[in-house]
Amino acid sequence: MSASSGFGLDHLPYGIFSVDNDSPRVGVRLGDRVIDLHAATGRPCFAEPSLNAFMALGPPAWAATRAEVTALAQSADPPSYAVGAVRLHLPFEVADYVDFYASLHHATNVGAIFRPGQEPLLPNWRHLPVGYHGRAGTVVPSGTSVVRPSGQLGDATFGPSRRLDLEAELGFVVGVGSALGSTVAHDDFARHVFGVVGLNDWSARDIQAWEYVPLGPFLGKSFATSISHWVTPLAALEAAWTDLPGQEPRPLDHLAPDRARGLDIDVEVLLDGEVVSRPPYSSMYWSPAQMLAHLTSNGASLRTGDLFASGTISGPEPEQRGSLLELSWGGTEPFAGGRTFLEDGDEVVLRYSAPGTSGGRITLGEVVGRIEPAGG
Amino acid sequence: MSASSGFGLDHLPYGIFSVDNDSPRVGVRLGDRVIDLHAATGRPCFAEPSLNAFMALGPPAWAATRAEVTALAQSADPPSYAVGAVRLHLPFEVADYVDFYASLHHATNVGAIFRPGQEPLLPNWRHLPVGYHGRAGTVVPSGTSVVRPSGQLGDATFGPSRRLDLEAELGFVVGVGSALGSTVAHDDFARHVFGVVGLNDWSARDIQAWEYVPLGPFLGKSFATSISHWVTPLAALEAAWTDLPGQEPRPLDHLAPDRARGLDIDVEVLLDGEVVSRPPYSSMYWSPAQMLAHLTSNGASLRTGDLFASGTISGPEPEQRGSLLELSWGGTEPFAGGRTFLEDGDEVVLRYSAPGTSGGRITLGEVVGRIEPAGG
């Protein structure tokens, strides 16, 4: 597969790039090139160092820009750079970051590992998309090294995590905010969400296991969350919508159980170059629009740059599990020749692909991270 | 007590104000007046609509400005407005919001109410300051009405919360950030924290009780968090530092158990004008500097505008409980003439006072909120 594969006219994802020491600005990827949108259009929102100003303009501007970029991409010589010659940055300024737990198979596996012999799913799980807030300030772009976190691993010890994990997820990026005290209806998803990113929700399982009662994960997650450089606009995913696997019991009306749709996105998890898992996003229980409707059902407002993630994507089969916790069954069943949790120096790559609108496949931005040893 | 009481030369808190329709900018409260810092000094950071640019300058600039403002306040006629003639705004742009759970009495009460017959404190509680991330985008300034949130109150019902509560807390505002992968030592607290605000962490107990396993509070908290208009700089609290009540077992070394200090701040909770509780901040188990050291112990970075709150302040006595959940013992013991949880139209006021550096007392910014009925 060439580097340009999956970045054709049916994709055109947005990112933030700079060349040498000039100012970061908005670019669109086409094949192996990055089109300089400010140079091409002169519009001020494309000179910004984040996508936020553009994303805040809303769906009509997104559609008009996509048409314009499509024409530009087909023109003789749009202002552009080789993707290998630019530096890529965090694509947007993250407002609030929420992480869901929307995979039935992941939640079931985690429940079975942590609470053996008990019913693995907690009573609320099939009634609402369980979620929590994460740390927006430690969302980093693909390629950023991750320092192994230290923390309390039990009551009397403090040290580097020994159970450092990845979580293969998909992230949804809010472009258009909403007012405090109002709700966002399920069917208004595309009026607010601009696009999707790949996301690795790095997790220190030993820190998390000790700290998480009763208020949830905190330092076990807050040290880093990696996202792709490229934001794929929803318009490029029109052919990827698919039926959900099924929801039983029927969710409440505001979660629109008759209209909820999933996404047919294939994910690959690579450890040091080897594919160790292929989680299918189509196996997710809760839909993206259901997550957003739930998030705002109490009147919480949205802001441009809000990021909400799916939670770990795990399919029904063992080789479709999206975390090392599951792949190694809590560390008890080494896989891929003896692996359990992440070692210093390990490189994790998450890859995503989806049906494109032209009959082929598009390649979403990958998420890369290498583990560095714990700090002194 | 006159309106000017507690806002003397030993206090000088910072806020953001506007007059008529002009631009919000930085002001300092002195008695019944708000000094216009940009008009007085011409410095650009005081023309900003948030304190963030000023707070990012760090302790030497904070100290120099405090000396300058003190001189200005004693001068003949500093540019100022009557506090009743200005509009007050959110004082800073909130980056990440973290809420701790640092009161032994609150955690014990909540454990006893939710898990009767079991050990009320969970095993981790005395070893680390338990905390979680909240929603930064729904932090609102004092005076903002709070719409009663709706949500799932159990598996098959959706409706307005029937157990809407307040939580009297203190918030700490970060001025100077830190690098990802580094930690902030306990003793570096004052190099990063600019000041404190009053904080009401509104909570819908029925939404929270159903949603919170296993990932913690989400929609039961995310609809609104109110903070005071005024940020009291740490310099005004120098006389308020006091010993902690005691920590057993001894916390780990990075939590500096020999040097940890608490704050002697008195809190009053008023419901429709009547004082229903007087929680003493001096009864808190975990210190502010321990919370910050814990928050960054995994290498998580800080940003200007990060807000971390203490969690509900409850003292050992029944009349010192900082939430209605505790004051009514889970709704089973009505107090103050039949009250349990918040009713539509209720007005909640949180008041704070502390020893000043001149021998008297200073009055921190109050936090006011009125409950509006659930939306249609």
Image (spheres, coloured by chain):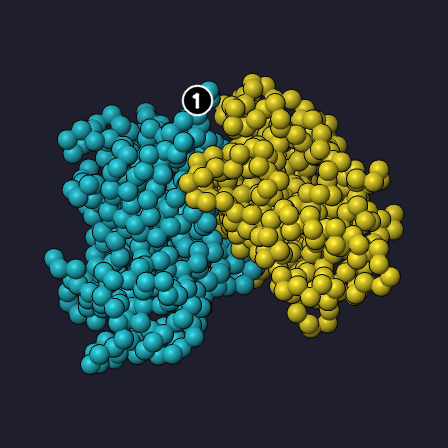
Chain colours: A cyan, B yellow
Q: Secondary structure at mark 1?
A: strand
What residue sits 13% from the left and 60% below the top?
A2
Q: Position of residue A43 (x, y in %)?
A: 40, 77
Relative to residue A277, is residue A14 depicted above or below? below
Write down the residue under mark 1: A157
- Judged from this view, the residue extending furthest toward the top is B249
What residue sits 40% from the left and 60% below the top?
A92
Q: Amino acid at mark 1?
A: Thr
Residue B313 makes an appearance in the image: yes
What residue sits 43% from the left and 30% below the top?
A151
**Left or right for A298, reference B46:** left
Counting the numbered discs, the total is 1
Relative to residue B316, is residue A33 depicted above or below? below
Badge 1: residue crowd in 10 Å (few <14, some 14–19, many ≥20):
few
Q: Position of residue A149 (x, y in %)?
A: 39, 35
Relative to residue A114, is residue B37 depicted above or below? below
Q: Position of residue A308 (x, y in %)?
A: 40, 53
The numbered mark 1 sits on a residue in which chain?
A: A
